[in-house]
Image: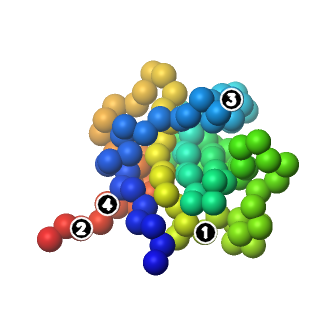
Amino acid sequence: MAKKKKLSKKNTALVAEKNEAAMVEGILEGSPDGIGVVIIRLECGCKKMAAVGLDGDAASEIIIYRDQAESICHKCKEDNGHYLRITEEFIHWQKPEPSDAQKEIINTKVFGPPPMTN
């Protein structure tokens, strides 16, 4: 069974790791409309990133990479980082950050609505 992905509400504590910071800065530099970078970490160690605009739409192309590797893993080459293999997903916001209400709207557009609880 696939690992359960973390919910975007819980991901507010997640931040870009030091080894991701250069990629985040490069993506934002090449995306003038970007207000943050979506970071998706996969169970294989590969990562997917893309800038997101204030409207919640992509502001850059999706980049998939693996730290300290020449290329992404074999699984990601086959399935482009399938969502069932996601371990963490969140948005690293650029300063000044949007309001909490706007962040929630963008998170919902990017990741979908949080699951319903009973």
- Which quadrant does the C terminus fall into? bottom left
Q: What residue is shown with label 1?
A: 82
Residue at image point 37% right, 51% down: 8
* Label pair 4/1, CB-CB below 8 angstroms: no
Name the kind of residue labelled 2 in the image: Met
* Label pair 2/1, CB-CB below 8 angstroms: no
Q: What residue is shown with label 3?
A: 22
Image location (x, y in percent) of residue 9: 32, 48
Which element type, helix, strand or loop, lies under badge 2? loop
Of circles 2 and 3, the one toward us is 3
Q: Hey, which residue is sitting farthest bottom in the picture?
A: 1
Q: Decide: is 89 above or below 84.
A: above
Alpha carbon distance from label 4 to label 2: 6 Å
Residue 48 in sight in this render:
no
Q: What residue is shown with label 4?
A: 114
Relative side of 116 to 118, left or right: right
Image location (x, y in percent) of residue 107: 41, 49
Q: What residue is shown with label 2?
A: 116
Alpha carbon distance from label 4 to label 1: 19 Å
Alpha carbon distance from label 3 to label 1: 24 Å
Name the kind of residue labelled 1 in the image: His
Alpha carbon distance from label 4 to label 3: 30 Å
